[in-house]
Image (spheres, coloured by chain):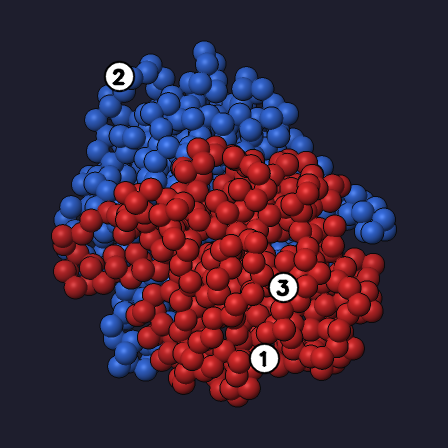
Amino acid sequence: MKFLRKQEFKNMSKGVAITGMGIISSIGNNVDENYKSLIGGKTGITRISKIKTVHKDDIMVGEIAFTNQELEQQLGLSPDNNYSRTALLGVIAAKQAIEEAGISNINTYKTGLISATSVGGMDKTEAYYYDYLEDKAAQKYIEGHHAGDSTQKIAEELGIDQSLVTTISTACSSAANAIMFGARLIKSGQLDRVIVGGSDCLSKFTINGFKTLMILSDTYNTPFDENRKGLNLGEAAAFLVLESDKVVKAENKKVLAYVKGYGNANDAFHQTASSENGDGATLAMQKALKVAELSPGDIDYINAHGTATGNNDLSEGRAILRTFEEHVPDFSSTKAYTGHTLAAAGAIEAVYSVLALQNNVIYPNLNFKTQMKEFSITPQLELKEKELQTVLSNSLGFGGNCSTVIFSKKQ
Amino acid sequence: MRAVYINSVGSISSQKTFDNSQFLDEIVSYEDNIILAVDPNYKDYIAPANSRRMAKGIKMGVVASKIALKEANLDNVDAIITGTGMGCLKDSKKFLSAIIDNDEQFLTPTSFIQSTHNTVGGQIALGLKCKGYNFTYVHASVSFESAVLDAKLMLENNEASSVLVGGVDEIEEYTCTLHKLINHIKEEKVNTTDLLGSKTKGAVFSEGANFFVLSNIKQDSSYAQIVAISTYNTIKSTNITDLAGTFLKENDLDIEAIDLLVLGNNGDVTYDSFYNELSCGVFNKTQQVYYKHLCGEFNTASSFGVWLASKILKTQKLPEVTKLNDIRASNYNTILLYNQYRGENHSFTLLRKC
């Protein structure tokens, strides 16, 4: 045992470096396209085109332009594949991340994969649910339903073999939690490298689920606006490559940014709604600051969860005020660009946070017109250039799940 | 790095395991391919008004966690980490079929809310008013092991001193129909005692919840120390024997150091070969037990294996019905558990008497 402990101690990593990123969302099929849309103020919110739903005229969504067939072609999958759209999007984004990180042989270092999803293979299940009984050709999708399936496929496509591969599903905070767990695995020396992120496709299941909760807007979502009408659902996938000090040093890696701090807490208030004063979100932000060894004044920009539901924006805004008091930094929500991409949101916004750090910009909070009356803080409304050192990103979800990740330029 | 202990258990399974004063004293025998959990009297633990609204998975999870908390003599914990392969399946089914049957109309939110994977962990937190760390892992047959790994990391690094960890899955009829279509569930009914002799494809599906309080502080109620846990998405380049050897070596142990091997055989003729390779190979001089004839197969069934191993370590008793071979260890100090499902998501867990 002594040997092991010494070994593990030796493997412990102070820094958690981000060395690659990949993303596909309604505002772009890769990192560059996403960044251009963000600084150009270009939204990806439209009417729904790929899913037949009776709600098509009542909702707007952030849909990815490619069809499944196009995505399958890009990945060179055989026609008998049983990929859900979640898996397709996930593989696309994860492969981009590996490429940017310059990884040719993934098994040179002990590499794991932590992915996040909420719908998993539900898109196929809802398409063939009753047909499965008769349609033998469709039955290949039955075992692709469970949440771990897309993760297994991503691992296979990346060549991650005989390693730590798992999936987190904590609703809208899932991918933030995947980043958090990945960072802890690097810090503790369990892994040298870990691919973290999430993927969720649009499905009738989630559209109708959120519809019953009456939190879907019938028009463009307006985060932190007094007259916000609810959220737009979106689909997306994003992954980040996290590497230890050891790998960065040995490979002389270019570091995009660091995962500096993280915190998770539970609101323990209601199954779907956030507490009025954002207890969970406040705790998550405070914990993340503590892990990062930063004070609130050190945060330069908050990429807020800001879903544009009445409940979230009030609760999160109050939590931000409780955490930062008189010194609330610039903040904005990017949900007006992408819609709420559920389990993927934390990873999408991690990519946006790193891009903010790299380019020293703060993205405008689109569609804002009227100041909320419960408090006086206003999101950043114009693109702002400013030297950034640290960005804090929030992801808050059902089941009271609240997560914060802090990204920094320096270790 | 601090040592991590299993300080208490709470189990709801196809056996009467909810009473911690007993240890498989009475075996429930089945002749079926789908078996259900033996229900405790839920009213003893949950107010009827709340219980009525709760999905079976939530009820099982809440009660198993209450049993575990009580035994650990705790009112609350620092973190709650849940593993579930499928979450509350009945509500997922209910919401999905309502969407299809009613053309997306007349839907109510309750089943949608309960269909989200983290609903069990969220409900436990809500019941305890626990504002701590709360994660849910949903990765097939390593869902529970991922939760244990996370908790172990947290406790070793002193980020928490008590963590509630559990595995929970519920059964749903239509999903079983689909899994029968693709031979994941056995076509024929199998008797509990004949599971491994069935020589047919598929498993006997079931449900259950096994929760544990893990801590970095040992106490009177402690069952075992969790020495190590590792999960593997695939095993391609090597075989399971080599992987077992590597895992033991990482922990400075050899085959002889293992007093008991706990295997997750589920009677699937296609995939039990992984277990057979170990039981007939390098571990052929080691005492072996199995358990899925008692608890059935589900994504978090391996949590029942950890429950079984914990009870054996604490009581130093081994139920006859679990024996896979005739070797008898002189005492039980170190137990190795191995599980996989359909050739993927393998795990090794190493427990030690404390």
> Which residue is nearer to you in this view: A297 or B157?
B157
Q: CA distance from mark 1 to mark 2?
A: 63 Å
The numbered mark at residue B347 is 3
> Which residue is nearer to you in this view: B323 or A289?
B323
Answer whether labels 3 and 1 touch (C-beta < 8 Å).
Answer: no
Task: Identify the element where label 1 is drawn.
Answer: loop
The answer to whether A312 is drawn above or below residue B103 in the figure is above
- Residue B6 is situated, as x and y percent measured from the top left of the image, at 64, 49
> Which residue is nearer to you in this view: B227 or A291?
B227
Q: CA distance from mark 3 to mark 1?
A: 14 Å
Q: For the residue marked with disc 1, what is the amino acid?
A: Asp
Left or right of B34 on screen, residue B71: right
Please tell me in which quadrant of the rendered image residue A363 appears.
Answer: top left
Q: Which subunit holds the residue at mark 2?
A: A
Task: Identify the element where label 3 is drawn.
Answer: strand
Q: For the residue marked with disc 2, what is the amino acid?
A: Lys
**What residue did someone put label 2 on?**
A373
- x 79%, y 57%: residue: B251
**What residue did someone put label 1 on?**
B272
Give a yes or no on whether discs 2 and 3 share a subunit. no
Which chain is blue in the picture? A
Sequence-wise, the earlier of marks 3 and 1 is 1
